[in-house]
Amino acid sequence: MIDPNAFYAGGIAVRTYDLFVEGGAFEGDVDFYRACTRRFGRTVLELGAGTGRIAIPLAQDGCAVTGLDLAPAMLDLAARRIAALPSEAAARIDLVQGDMADFDLKKTFDWIVIAARAFQHLIEPVQQRAALDAMHRHLKPGGHVVMHLFDPRLEFCLPDAPAPQQAREVWDPAAGCRVRRTIIARHNDPLRQVVGERMRLETFDQAGTVVATEETSWALRWTLRQEMTWLLELCGFQPVEQWSDFHGAPPAYGKEQIWVARAA
């Protein structure tokens, strides 16, 4: 069985994480979450906070942000970035290592954000429900949860569906090199609604020679919109908005699932 979180253990995958989530399905997400602070409040819990990609802009806008993540390597990178901020903004961010399906921070928040499909790394329904129950306990009355999932295209969920052949490449300005990420194997389990992917990451020098390589993996659980509606309602939330991108497009098959739900 593929480790759903092996990708976040360190190395090239963590160092270049933000570069691979820029644009595409994530285009506009930071501005979307910044706008949420004007609607929902300035005390924020981010689950799956990762490298601080969302927490840092929110703190720069004046929010008090608690960022929880399972992966120490991701939190270490976030801490280094936070340390480089002006002291006023850095003081607004508190990082916590923990499991979004089992946490107790002993305080409540105006709203909770789970960006970049992080919720889908909970690959068992019991974990998803436990996470939503914990979120509900950590919200002030009438508080909101905002989360981003992918909407599954069912032809890609079949057991024999091929892995994408096209590799993705980005430029890593910090290291001054090109980085390629290639999915080398995919396993779909339609019964459990889980997709596991193995991938290879390579860095290249200016001559195009591979200078470093690593293989890693992750797994995610796909969730249909109606299933997500029931899960939210089961855990005490009322879905109030759905979008298929971060620019206000209505729900659409095979696009993204952006949810806003209020604690009932």
Image: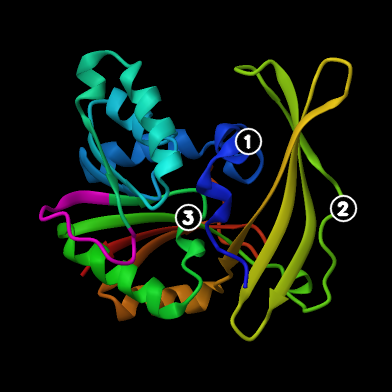
Residue 248 visible in the shown view: no
Q: Position of residue 85 (x, y in %)?
A: 32, 16
- For the residue marked with disc 2, what is the amino acid? Gln
- First in sequence, mark 3 or 2: give its number: 3
Q: Which residue is mark 3?
A: 118
Q: Residue at x 44, y 36 (%)?
A: 51
**Closest to the observer: 91 or 185?**
185
Quick one: SS at disc 3? helix
Q: Residues within 10 Å of mark 1 (few under 14, many from 20)?
A: many
- First in sequence, mark 1 or 3: give its number: 1
Residues shaded magenta: 99-111
Q: Which residue is mark 2?
A: 165
Q: Residue furthest bottom?
A: 191
Q: Which image quarter holds the N terminus?
A: bottom right
Residue 109 lies within the magenta run: yes
- For the residue marked with disc 3, what is the amino acid? Ala
**Given contact means CB atoms under 8 Å apart, are the residues at marks 3 and 2 in contact?**
no
Q: Is residue 177 above or below residue 240?
A: above
Q: Residues within 10 Å of mark 2 (few under 14, many from 20)?
A: few
Q: Is residue 148 above or below residue 192?
A: above
Snapshot quadrant of residue 214: top right
Q: Residue at x 81, y 61 (%)?
A: 163
Measured Cα–Cα span from mark 1 to mark 2 = 20 Å
Residue 21 lies within the magenta run: no
Q: Which residue is mark 1?
A: 12
Q: Position of residue 110 (x, y in %)?
A: 19, 49
Q: Residue at x 28, y 28 (%)?
A: 59
